[in-house]
Image (cartoon, rainbow, N blue to C red):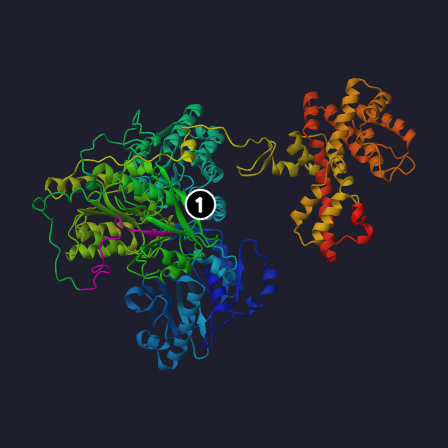
C-alpha cells in the first residue's frame, strides 16, 4: 500500500459523486478555483453564486489546521475575497507553528455555512494492519484539540463491515437522540465510500449536522495509489500535490513519469536545490540510510535531494535519472563545491556494471559543468559484477579529471558519507575485493570441519555444559500477548519444498545453486506454476548436471502431484497476486507464502501458519533454504558465508538492506542463522515481533538483529517483549529514517510504509524507546557493525557462542551467460547483423535512429536503401524504388502467383499460408527475371558485345534473353509501366548506359517479332544496375555483388506481395468458396488401351 495525500477539492469531488447514504447530504459542492491570472468576469459568469453568497477562501495545499493558523478567509463577499487573495496569493507566508515559508499557489472559494458549535462533529477513518479505525468526537471545529485522546474509537476488522448498531453504541453515545440516526446512516455510507475507493485516511472536521441536512466542511484524505488499476475509472486522473511546505518541481514529475513507464523504481524528491550534498542511491532502504547518515553528520541543511533507483533499471533509464540529478546540481555554484554520493547496498540481481554505464554516460555528458562546480563524487556499491562497475567509474574519473572515489563491499556502506563530509580520511588505495569469478573456487583450503557443521549453528555443536544463557525467559507471560508465542519456531528446513508462481527462471536457478552449495540432498523447488503456457518441463542446473523441473498451468495440478510442498513463492504482479495467493491457500499443505511484488490491497493476508509480504522477496536460512533472489548471486552467498548457519538471526524491512546485513554480520560474527526481510509495505504479512519471538525460542540463535524504519509501531512490541522478559536474548536494533524529523516538509521515502503519521512512529522516537527498554541501539547506522561485533564478542567471551572451523562448500560452475557478461570468456556469435539494432532506447536502421528516418522523411524507398544496401540513397533512387514497388504490385488474377494465392484463400487457409503459396511460384518463368536480366545484359555489355552479337550469341546457345518479351504487350501496344519507369530513369539517373544497351537489343528483337519488347522485369533489372553503378554510393564490385546475391528479385517479391495480399483479402471479403477446376478445362490424356 502506498498512501498518497490528495487535495481537498479532489476528495470532496469523489465524496459527493460516489457516497451512498440515506442521510440528507448537502450534495452540491460549490467551489471555484482561483489563481493570480483568474478572469473574474468570466468566473462570476460560470459561478453566479459568488456574487450572492457569503464566502470562504482557503488554500488547498495539504496544510494542517488552516483555520487554527489563521490561513482561511471567512464570511467574505467577493470583494473581500479579492482583497484576501491580494495579501496571500503568490506571497510568501510564514506558518509560525512549523516555521515554514510557503507560497499560496492553489486556492479555492467555497460557500460559507453558518453553524452552531453543537452542530459540529469530528470524524476520521484510517487504516492499520488490523483493520480500519473510525474516530468520532461529538465536538468538532478548529478547537477540537487532541482528538487521539478525546475521540471514541471503533475498529472494523479486515473484511468486516461497519454496522449502524455498533456505531450508535460505541461512537454516538454523546450525540443528541434526534441526530443519532442521521449520523449513523452518514457514517456507514462514508465508511463504505472509504473502502470502495481505496482510501487509507479520511478526516472531516467539522462535519455539520443541522435539522435539515449534513454538510462536509473541511476534509483531508489519502488514497492507496497502488489501487490505481482497480479505481482508475472512478478516480480519473488524480493529481497528487506536493507535501505541505515543499514546491512541486518539473524534474520530480519527469522522474515520476519515467517511474510509471518502467518496471524499475525511480524516485526523486528535491529538498533544497541550493544544497551542496546530492545523492544517487540504489535501493529504497539504502536511500533512507544514506539520508540518515548525512543528517547525523551535520549535513541536513545542505542535503539537496532524496531519491532512489532500484529494480534493475536499464542503461537508458539510469542515464535519464542521472542526467536529471547532474543537471539540477550544476545550476547553482556553492562556495565549498559540491559532493555527489552514488551509493547503495549489495544488490540481489541488478547488474551493477550495466546500471553504472548509464551514470558514466551522464557524467561524461556533464563533465564540463561538474568540473566548473567543483563536484567530487563518492561511489560505494556491491552486487553482481560490481567490480567491473567500480572499475569503469574509476576510469571515467581519470579520463574526465573529475575526482571520483570508488569503494566496494570491503567498505562499510555509509563510510563514504563521512569521507564526503570530511569526517573521516579518504583511503589512498582502498582494498581490492576478489573478482566476481572467484566463486568458481573454494574460499578455504581447510577440509577438517565435518560436513554436519554446515547444517547446524556453529554454536550448537558445543557441549551443553559450556552454554550459559543470558537470562531465562519469564514464564507466566499472558497467553496471546504476542502473535507467534505458540507457533513453530522454524520456517524452513533442509527438507523444505516450494512451488514458484511465475516464470522466474533466474530466481529458481539461484535457489538451486544455493541448495547445492548447502549440500542439500535435493532441490528446494519442486515445481513452477505459470498459467500462460501448457504443462511442460523447464531445464535447470543442479551443480554440474542438467535437471528438468515441471511447470504446470494451474495450481491444483501442481499441489496434487507434489504433496511434499509447504511453501509458495509468488512472483505474481499486483493485479494477480491476491487471486493467485487465495487460490493457493485453499490447499492446507501450504504453510508459508512469500510475495515478490506488492498487492494493491491495503488489507494484509493472514492465512496459514505464517505469511510474508514483501515488495522484494526476502528470506534465507543458511544451509537450508532461501527465497528467490535473497542473498544475491552465488559470489555474495559465499562471501557472506550463507551456505552454513551462524549464530545471529535478523529481521529487516528492506530486501536490499538484508544483503547488507548479511555482509555486516559475516564480517563481525560467525554468520547468519536466519534472515527475513518482511518488506517495506505499510502492512506486511508478518511483523518484526513474529520473527523476534521465533528467534527467541530457537536454540541455535544466540543474538538478534532488527533493522526497523520510520512508520508503524511494531518496534514498540519489541520494547514490550524485552521489558516483560519474553525476549531475553541480546537484541541489536536500529530504525532507519531518523532524518525525517529534521526535514521541514514531509518526505515519502522509497518504501510505502516509510512515513510517520504521528510522533511515536518516527525513527528517533522508536530508537529511543528501544534503547530505554534494554536493546543495543547504535548512535547511527554507521556504527551498527561495531555494536553487533561488541555484543557478539561478549557472547563468545562468556562461552555462549563457540565459533567452529570453516568448511569449504561444493564448487558450482558459473553460468555461461554470466561468464560472458563478465568478460571471462568469448565465443563467436551465432548470428551477425549489420543492418538493424533494437537493443537501445530506439530502433536503429543501418546506423540511423528511427526518429531520424521520419524526421528526414526518407519514405519506404529510403528505409529499403538502409536495410538492403546499408546506404542512404539519393532522393531519386528512393523514388525509383518506390515506383518499382508500385508497378510490380499486381498484374491481375490470372498470373500463377495470384492464382495460387486465390486458390489457397478459397481453401480456407490463413493469410501467411496463402501469401507463401503465391510467392513460391516466383522464379525464372514468373517474376524472377529481374536478376537474370540484369546479369545477362551486364555481362554482354561489360564483355564489349554489340547488341546484334549478343542477340545472335543467345540464339546460338539456345537461351532466352531474360527481360525480353511479353505475352500481351508489343511495340504497337506498349506497356505503360515500362514507359513510366523509362521516362523517370532517363530524366533523373546520371547515366543510363545499360538501359541504352537494352533498348538497342529491343530494336533488334522487335524487328523480328513485335512482342519481343523490353518488359518491366528487364527494364527494372538494367536500370537498377545503372543506379548501383552510377549513384556514387557503391564501388563497381559492391554493385555487382548486390546483383549476384539476388537483391533485385527482392523488389519483385516485395512489390508483388502487396498484390497477393490484396487478392487474399478480396476473396475473403467476397466470401468465395472452395475452388475446384472445371473438367471441361482439363485435357485428360490417358494411355490408349484405357481410352473409351
* Above or below: residue 585 compared with residue 860: below
Q: Is residue 1084 visible?
A: yes
Q: Is residue 93 visible?
A: no
Give the magenta range. 479-500
Q: How packed is label 1: few (under 14 Cα within 10 Å), some, or many (20 or more)?
A: some
List x then y, in percent, for residue 831. 54, 32
- The furthest residue to the front: 1089
Taking 22 as reference, is 985 left or right?
A: right
| The N terminus: image quadrant | bottom left
List x then y, in percent, for residue 677. 31, 49
- The furthest residue to the bottom: 178
* Above or below: residue 568 compared with residue 199: above
Q: Is residue 917 magenta?
A: no
Q: Please give the name of the residue rendered at 75% of the width and 32% of the height, measured from the top-left corner.
A: 930
Viewer-nearest residue: 856 or 1011: 1011
Name the residue carrying label 1: 264
Disc 1 secondary structure class: loop
* Above or below: residue 119 compared with residue 98: below
Taking 611 as reference, is 66 left or right?
A: right
List x then y, in percent, for residue 1067. 73, 54
Taking 808 as reference, is 264 left or right?
A: right
Tell me where residue 325 sits by quadrant. Answer: top left
Q: So how many labels did they put on this image? A: 1
Viewer-nearest residue: 703 or 131: 703
- The furthest residue to the left: 465
Viewer-nearest residue: 238 or 885: 885
Taking 475 as reference, is 220 left or right?
A: right
Tell me where residue 561 sits by quadrant. Answer: bottom left
List x then y, in percent, for residue 874. 72, 30
Amino acid at each position: 500500500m502506498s498512501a498518497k495525500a490528495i487535495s481537498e477539492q479532489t476528495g470532496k469531488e469523489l465524496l459527493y459523486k460516489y457516497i451512498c447514504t440515506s442521510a440528507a447530504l448537502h450534495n452540491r459542492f460549490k467551489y471555484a478555483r482561483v489563481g493570480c491570472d483568474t478572469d473574474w468576469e468570466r468566473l462570476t459568469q460560470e459561478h453566479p453564486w459568488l456574487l450572492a453568497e457569503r464566502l470562504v477562501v482557503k488554500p488547498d495545499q495539504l496544510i494542517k489546521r488552516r483555520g487554527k493558523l489563521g490561513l482561511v478567509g471567512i464570511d467574505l463577499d467577493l470583494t473581500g475575497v479579492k482583497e484576501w487573495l491580494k495579501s496571500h496569493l503568490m506571497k510568501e507566508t510564514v506558518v509560525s507553528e512549523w516555521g515554514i515559508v510557503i507560497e499560496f499557489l492553489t486556492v479555492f472559494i467555497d460557500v460559507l455555512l453558518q453553524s452552531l458549535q453543537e452542530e459540529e462533529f469530528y470524524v476520521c477513518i484510517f487504516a492499520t494492519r488490523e483493520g480500519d479505525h473510525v474516530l468520532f468526537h461529538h465536538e468538532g471545529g478548529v478547537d477540537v484539540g487532541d482528538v487521539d485522546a478525546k475521540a471514541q474509537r471503533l475498529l472494523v476488522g479486515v473484511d468486516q463491515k461497519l454496522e449502524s448498531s455498533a456505531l450508535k453504541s460505541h461512537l454516538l453515545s454523546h450525540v443528541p437522540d434526534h441526530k443519532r440516526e442521521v449520523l449513523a446512516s452518514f457514517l456507514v455510507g462514508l465508511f463504505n465510500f472509504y473502502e470502495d475507493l481505496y482510501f487509507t485516511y479520511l478526516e472531516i472536521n467539522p462535519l455539520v449536522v443541522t435539522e435539515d441536512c449534513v454538510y462536509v466542511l473541511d476534509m483531508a484524505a489519502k488514497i492507496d495509489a497502488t489501487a490505481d488499476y482497480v479505481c482508475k475509472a472512478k478516480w480519473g486522473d488524480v493529481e497528487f500535490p506536493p507535501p505541505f511546505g515543499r514546491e512541486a518541481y518539473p524534474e520530480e514529475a519527469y522522474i515520476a513519469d519515467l517511474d510509471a513507464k518502467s518496471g524499475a523504481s525511480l524516485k526523486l524528491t528535491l529538498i533544497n536545490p541550493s544544497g551542496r550534498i546530492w545523492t544517487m542511491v540504489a535501493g529504497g532502504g539504502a536511500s533512507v540510510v544514506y539520508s540518515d547518515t548525512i543528517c547525523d553528520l551535520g549535513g541536513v541543511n545542505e542535503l539537496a535531494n532524496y531519491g532512489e533507483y532500484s529494480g534493475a533499471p536499464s542503461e537508458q533509464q539510469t542515464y535519464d535519472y542521472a542526467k536529471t540529478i547532474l543537471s539540477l546540481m550544476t545550476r547553482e555554484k556553492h562556495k565549498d563545491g559540491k559532493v555527489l554520493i552514488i551509493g547503495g547496498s549489495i544488490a540481489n540481481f541488478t547488474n551493477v556494471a550495466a546500471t553504472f554505464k548509464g551514470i558514466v554516460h551522464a557524467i561524461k555528458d556533464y563533465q564540463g559543468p561538474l568540473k566548473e562546480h567543483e563536484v567530487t563524487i563518492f561511489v560505494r556499491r556491491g552486487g553482481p559484477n560490481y567490480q567491473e562497475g567500480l572499475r569503469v567509474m574509476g576510469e571515467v574519473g581519470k579520463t574526465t579529471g573529475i575526482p571520483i572515489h570508488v569503494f566496494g563491499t570491503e567498505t562499510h556502506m555509509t563510510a563514504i558519507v563521512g569521507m564526503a563530509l570530511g569526517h573521516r580520511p579518504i583511503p589512498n588505495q582502498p582494498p581490492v575485493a576478489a573478482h566476481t569469478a572467484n566463486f568458481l573456487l573454494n574460499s578455504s583450503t581447510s577440509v577438517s570441519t565435518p560436513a554436519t557443521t554446515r547444517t547446524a549453528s556453529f554454536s550448537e555443536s558445543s557441549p551443553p555444559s559450556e552454554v550459559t544463557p543470558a537470562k531465562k525467559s519469564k514464564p507466566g507471560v499472558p497467553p496471546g500477548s504476542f502473535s507467534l508465542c505458540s507457533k513453530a519456531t522454524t520456517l524452513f528446513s533442509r527438507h523444505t519444498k516450494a512451488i514458484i508462481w511465475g516464470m522466474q527462471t533466474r530466481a529458481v536457478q539461484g535457489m538451486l545453486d544455493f541448495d547445492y552449495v548447502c549440500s542439500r540432498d535435493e532441490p528446494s523447488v519442486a515445481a513452477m506454476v505459470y498459467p500462460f503456457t501448457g504443462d511442460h518441463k523447464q531445464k535447470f542446473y543442479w551443480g554440474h548436471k542438467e535437471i528438468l523441473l515441471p511447470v504446470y498451468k494451474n495450481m491444483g495440478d501442481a499441489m496434487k502431484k507434489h504433496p511434499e510442498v509447504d511453501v509458495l513463492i509468488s512472483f505474481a504482479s499486483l493485479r494477480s497476486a491476491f487471486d493467485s495467493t487465495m487460490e493457493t491457500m485453499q490447499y492446507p499443505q501450504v504453510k508459508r507464502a512469500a510475495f515478490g511484488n506488492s498487492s494493491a490491497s491495503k488489507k494484509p493476508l493472514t492465512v496459514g501458519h505464517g505469511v510474508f509480504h514483501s515488495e522484494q522477496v526476502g528470506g534465507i536460512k543458511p544451509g537450508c533454504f532461501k527465497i528467490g533472489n535473497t542473498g544475491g548471486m552465488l559470489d555474495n552467498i559465499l562471501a557472506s558465508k550463507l551456505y552454513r548457519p551462524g549464530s545471529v538471526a535478523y529481521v529487516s524491512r528492506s530486501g536490499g538492506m538484508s544483503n547488507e546485513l548479511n555482509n555486516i554480520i559475516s564480517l563481525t560474527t560467525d554468520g547468519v542463522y536466519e534472515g527475513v526481510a518482511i518488506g517495506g509495505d505499510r502492512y506486511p504479512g508478518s511483523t518484526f515481533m513474529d520473527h523476534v519471538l521465533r528467534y527467541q525460542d530457537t536454540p541455535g540463535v544466540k543474538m538478534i538483529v532488527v533493522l526497523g524504519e520510520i512508520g508503524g509501531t511494531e518496534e514498540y512490541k519489541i520494547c514490550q517483549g524485552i521489558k516483560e522478559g519474553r525476549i531475553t536474548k541480546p537484541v541489536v536494533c536500529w530504525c532507519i529514517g531518523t532524518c525525517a524529523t529534521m526535514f521541514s516538509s514531509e518526505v515519502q521515502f522509497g518504501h510505502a510504509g516509510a512515513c510517520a503519521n504521528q510522533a511515536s512512529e518516527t525513527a528517533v522516537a522508536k530508537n529511543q524507546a528501544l534503547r530505554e527498554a534494554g536493546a543495543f541501539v547504535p548512535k547511527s547506522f554507521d556504527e551498527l557493525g561495531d555494536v553487533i561485533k561488541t555484543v557478539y564478542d561478549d557472547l563468545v567471551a562468556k562461552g555462549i557462542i563457540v565459533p567452529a572451523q570453516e568448511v569449504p562448500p561444493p564448487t558450482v560452475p558459473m553460468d555461461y551467460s554470466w561468464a560472458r557478461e563478465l568478460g571471462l570468456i568469448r565465443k563467436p556469435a551465432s548470428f551477425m547483423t549489420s543492418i538493424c539494432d533494437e537493443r537501445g532506447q530506439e530502433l536503429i536502421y543501418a546506423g540511423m535512429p528511427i526518429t531520424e528516418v521520419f524526421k528526414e522523411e526518407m519514405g519506404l524507398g529510403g528505409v529499403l536503401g538502409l536495410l538492403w544496401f546499408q546506404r542512404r540513397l539519393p532522393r531519386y533512387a528512393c523514388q525509383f524504388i518506390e515506383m518499382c514497388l508500385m508497378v510490380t504490385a499486381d498484374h491481375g488474377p490470372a498470373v500463377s502467383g495470384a492464382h495460387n494465392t486465390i486458390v489457397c484463400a478459397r481453401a480456407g487457409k490463413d493469410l501467411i499460408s496463402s501469401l507463401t503459396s503465391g510467392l513460391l511460384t516466383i522464379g525464372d518463368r514468373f517474376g524472377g527475371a529481374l536478376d537474370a536480366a540484369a546479369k545477362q545484359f551486364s555481362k554482354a555489355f561489360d564483355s564489349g558485345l554489340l547488341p546484334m552479337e549478343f542477340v545472335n550469341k543467345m540464339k546460338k546457345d539456345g537461351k532466352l534473353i531474360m527481360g525480353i518479351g511479353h505475352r500481351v504487350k508489343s511495340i504497337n501496344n506498349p506497356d505503360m509501366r515500362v514507359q513510366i519507369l523509362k521516362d523517370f530513369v532517363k530524366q533523373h539517373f546520371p547515366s543510363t548506359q545499360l538501359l541504352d544497351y537494352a533498348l538497342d537489343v529491343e530494336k533488334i528483337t522487335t524487328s523480328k517479332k513485335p512482342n519481343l519488347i523490353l518488359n518491366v522485369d528487364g527494364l527494372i533489372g538494367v536500370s537498377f544496375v545503372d543506379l548501383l553503378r552510377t549513384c556514387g554510393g557503391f564501388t563497381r564490385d559492391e554493385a555487382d555483388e548486390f546483383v549476384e546475391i539476388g537483391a533485385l528479385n527482392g523488389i519483385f517479391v516485395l512489390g508483388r506481395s502487396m498484390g497477393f495480399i490484396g487478392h487474399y483479402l478480396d476473396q475473403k471479403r467476397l466470401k468465395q468458396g472452395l475452388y475446384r477446376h472445371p473438367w471441361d478445362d482439363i485435357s485428360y490424356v490417358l494411355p490408349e488401351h484405357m481410352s473409351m
